[in-house]
Image (spheres, rainbow, N blue to C red):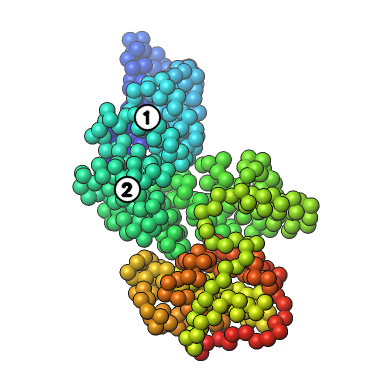
Amino acid sequence: MGWLRPSHYFPILIKLMHRPWFSGLLLATCLFAQTHSSPSLPEELLRHAVELQQLGDLEGAVKGYREFLAVRPNEIAAHSNLGVVLAHLGRYEEAVAEYQKALELAPGNSGILINLGLAYYKSGRISDASATFAKAHETSPENLQTILLLADCHLRMGQNREVVALLGPLEQAHADDLAIAYMLGMALLRDGQVQEGQARVDKILRNGDSAESRFLLGSQMLASHDFPAAVKQFAGAIELNSNLPDLQASYGQALLSTGDADAAAEAFRRELASDPNHFEANLYLAQILLARKQWSEATPPIQKALLLRPDSLPAKLELADLQVGDAKLSQARSTLEAAAMLWPKSLGVHQRLSEVYAALHLKAGAQREKTLVANLQSKEIVTDRSPKPGDQAPEFSVIKMGSDQSTTLSQLRRAGPVLLVFGSYTCPNFRGATDTLNRLYPEYKAHVPFYLIYIREAHSTQDWASTQNAREGVALKPATTMEEQKGHATMCVRKLHIEFPALLDTMNGKAEEAYTAWPSKAFVLNKDGRIIFSTGLSEQEFKPDQLESALRKVRAPLKASRLQPAAQ
């Protein structure tokens, strides 16, 4: 029996992986053969340890090998065998120590290097495993097992281009090797090379329907941002093999992207139940818990993510968010200042550092960071085309719910501040934010009018189904006329108990387009019509305290009454 589980990415890999139990046992057997002609007490100790290992008495074997090594501390095979037994018992750090002792006696031994790499791998020390497999690869460059293990480590660390560089040259010589096609396809898709990844997907699909083929298809759709399609493919893969490594984590990412944070958290937890050292599952689960202000629950996955990838910027930012949420501002300051040294051009680092300095009443530092943030924002490559804080709010024309008359942003503002909320009933994120909006409205309505701009459905039954909507019984077809749009908006206002006025975007979606507001966003405008705050409404983006802070900044007595709420 061996302690290595099947390949992390494709079952066929198991055929290529030597099981370390056998490699260690072989060394010990050879040693015994060399010493059997002149038996003595040490050799009897070794014979007994090997017998216990063969019989499955692993604790006894550990004791036996340690007794032998107390007498013969420089026997390579005994250290290696002891490492194998300890690894099988899950005592990976002890196994690592034994393999390292064996390597001191036999530098460059590829078999021991592989076993050491596997012990690192199983203990979650993926960067150490990668470095060890790289050494084994240098020692035996033609060993396909080592190459695949190294590629697997690169994938787990998000080093997709390294996977392509490692496996790409092998593909032609191993044209029928589905393991190489699978790992290479996954790396290409995750690197955004969707067309190249598609060619490897096709190769897998030609071998028939399987959990692996559906997993690859889902990964392709995830890379293309077709999140609902990805959810369906991942769900289909789970039906065929729910234990396929990495699958639940990818499913969770797709669910999170469709706004279903509850189901995503469950998927991440399922991944972690089988692989506690999965970086993305730890990272994204922590993100959800932080958004829900569950500080103590978020601590273990953040710590694990940082242990797995100490140089991860997202994990460092999560740690800082945790420290801020837990009122440990001095610790957050230290974390962010260290991050700023490593990532001096990170907008997220400097934004948080500005907030922490302000909270610590360090005015000079806060102002310095604000200046850095403004400079970085001016140089940022913009992918989100929605207007940003500081921009003049785009003009638009929408329809009043009660009278079917049109009105413009200028008429709604009347030279005063305003909160614009874009959303639809089928958007789980918008529905989740309405409790906060309903709570804030009575306090601020006399100073800052709230308006819901009802836009096209986020998750209509025809275009973009949502797992959360399915659970909550929310199902709407896309509106094809203004009358249908009004019906959807009326139901939304009624079911979500929204008291502030609702307005309808036109069927050509000009308001939504002007603000790039789909599926849901909120904007606070000051009296000059400039945006001072904007946010998406997903659980991870939407921070009620930040919205309320923006409302307080623009609050001012109104000179005249505004548009009254439509009759519900």
Viewer-nearest residue: 1 or 265: 265
SS for callout 1: helix
- Residue 216 is marked as 2
Does residue 18 appear left or right of residue 334 in this picture? left
Q: At x 48% / y 70%, what residue is drawn?
A: 510
Relative placement, left or right, of 396 versus 173 is right
Residue 58 visible somewhere in the drawing? no
Q: Quadrant of the N terminus?
A: top left
In the rendered image, the vertical position of residue 66 relative to residue 451, given as above or below: above
Q: Amino acid at mark 2?
A: Leu
Q: Position of residue 57 (x, y in %)?
A: 36, 34
Residue at 42% in and 43% down: 191
Question: Is residue 237 depicted above or below 436 in this figure?
Answer: above
Which residue type does callout 1 highlight?
Answer: Ile
**Total residue callouts:** 2
Residue 446 appears in the rendering: yes
Residue at the image point whose x is 69% and y is 49% from the top: 372
Disc 1 crowd, CA 10 A, few/some/many (<14, 14-19, 20+): many
User: How far apart are the two marked residues, 2 and 1, measured between alpha carbons?
Assistant: 21 Å
Q: Is residue 257 left or right of residue 563?
A: left
Residue linked to disc 1: 147
Q: In this picture, is 422 found above or below 243?
A: below
User: Toward the viewer: 68 or 521?
Assistant: 521
Rendered image: mark on residue 507: none
